[in-house]
Image (cartoon, coloured by chain):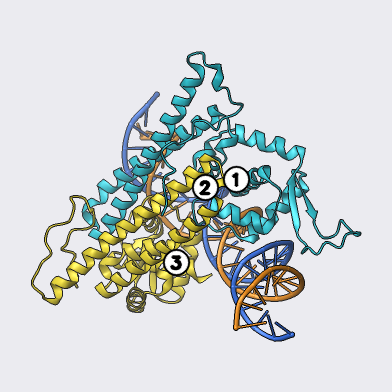
Chain colours: A yellow, B cyan, C orange, D blue
Amino acid sequence: MRSKSEILDLAILGLLQEAPMHGYELRKRLNLLLGSFRALSYGSLYPALKSLVERELIAGVDTASPPPHALSGKRARIVYEMTADGKEHLAEMLANAGPAAWEDEHFDVRFAFFAQTDAETRLRILEGRRTRLAERLDQVRTSAARTRERVDEYTLELQRHGLEQVEREVKWLDGLIDNERDTRRERTGSGRPADSDTQGDPGSPQRGIEERR
Amino acid sequence: MRSKSEILDLAILGLLQEAPMHGYELRKRLNLLLGSFRALSYGSLYPALKSLVERELIAGVDTASPPPHALSGKRARIVYEMTADGKEHLAEMLANAGPAAWEDEHFDVRFAFFAQTDAETRLRILEGRRTRLAERLDQVRTSAARTRERVDEYTLELQRHGLEQVEREVKWLDGLIDNERDTRRERTGSGRPADSDTQGDPGSPQRGIEERR
DNA sequence: CTCCCGATGTATCAGTTCGATACATCGGTG
DNA sequence: CACCGATGTATCGAACTGATACATCGGGAG
């Protein structure tokens, strides 16, 4: 009920934080933000925008009507921008890392806005996510062991591949967590900068993700 | 509209092909079949079952009522089994590899029933899926190149990871495709009638099944 | 210059799916 | 024997999707 719309609110506010935008663009940015696909339909977006406007977390400005004097050749569109309340609300959401934050749908969005999230919360979310995945891994492996004999090879291969994907994701998370810890350690002062990466391709963001504000 | 319920029909029929089952079990099997998660709710399952019964593709037998003589201590449950029409319908669906077959939701299910699918169709689906993924990869890379400068490192990392996952999947598909081709060549190639198994379990992924802890 | 077409843009609706929940029985365990 | 978690069937309202309608913009073909 709330889960989806809540995370959608967060995503919208997060994007509007960077710059005011109109619906169409918002949708595009949202879709490419989330990895690759996962098309968000207008049927979700517009109601969400409406709700946000009603709650006065954002304000919609029609570009066409306001200037009666200047004949802005521009097409009519509604540009949304955050209000003060909206900024506050966003900050709250970003600071709060409830157990929902590491479920599938939520995690990607939360991660996408890590730059606006404090280090504490980042770490909490990453670790929560990791635990969640490990849990799932365990569960699947157990039930897979029970059905081992009764399934054909294709099904088996599908499960194996699924498992591998999740394992890969866990490793990815481990890299990110290490990175966060290193950054934190540097910040809190102790000597060793923990310099070189263990491998050439941990692929995680190199350091230097500082908060600027 | 149809897309989801159609694939759900296929999945149900495919499972019932193996053995008659009741709703609860069907759901469990379905959920662990599909990789790991992706919970299917009863709100979808029961209506689907009802529809299938109406179309007489399956038949539901209440285990409790039939035997008035034997006091079967068994709990009341409805076991579903395929009808002749259902088997026919399933065979049709399995033989048909429309362009929908390699979309995200469909592919997993189609793959899960590859053992019941002929080699021709298997190959078509695998290749269709591969093309689809490559397409997506291309698209994402292009749009990513355009936005490269404007996004923070976490967003970048998220996209990079997403891309990597898809690339990995493409490689996986390549392996499977090669495997199918080899199997096919063996079959059509030199005259070794000894190999003639009725329908294909043979090829299948050979790498996968290694030890689990 | 004009016409057409694909991209941009806002918006809604019917049909589906989901999450929660209700209800009931079964098999253990303390 | 009382509790409790797993098994089992079933439904409802809220939410989401895919399709569609409508309109304007920019640019290339003729």
Give yes or no for contact between labels 3 and 2 (Cβ–Cβ under 8 Å).
no
Q: Position of residue B122 (x, y in %)?
A: 52, 32
Q: Amino acid at mark 2?
A: Glu
The residue beneath circle 2 is: B105
Q: Are marks 1 and 2 in contact (CB under 8 Å)?
A: yes
Q: Are marks 1 and 2 on the same chain?
A: yes
In the image, residue A26 sits, relative to residue B84, either above or below, namely: below
10 Å neighbourhood of mark 2: few (<14), some, or many (≥20)?
A: some
Q: Nearer the viewer, residue A64 or A5?
A: A5
Residue beneath the point at 18% across and 52% down: A199
Residue D19 left/right relative to B183: right
Which chain letter goes with mark 3?
Answer: A
Please, what is the three-letter code of the amino acid marked with disc 3?
Answer: Leu
- Residue that badge 1 annotates: B7
Along the viewing direction, whichever of A3 and A21 lies nearer the viewer = A3
Identify the residue shown where x is 37% and y is 54%.
Answer: A167
Q: Is residue B20 left or right of residue B148?
A: right
Within 10 Å of disc 1 (Cα), the crowding (few <14, some 14-19, many 20+) is: some
Q: CA distance from mark 1 to mark 3?
A: 33 Å
Q: Chain of mark 1?
A: B
Q: Which residue is mark 3?
A: A49
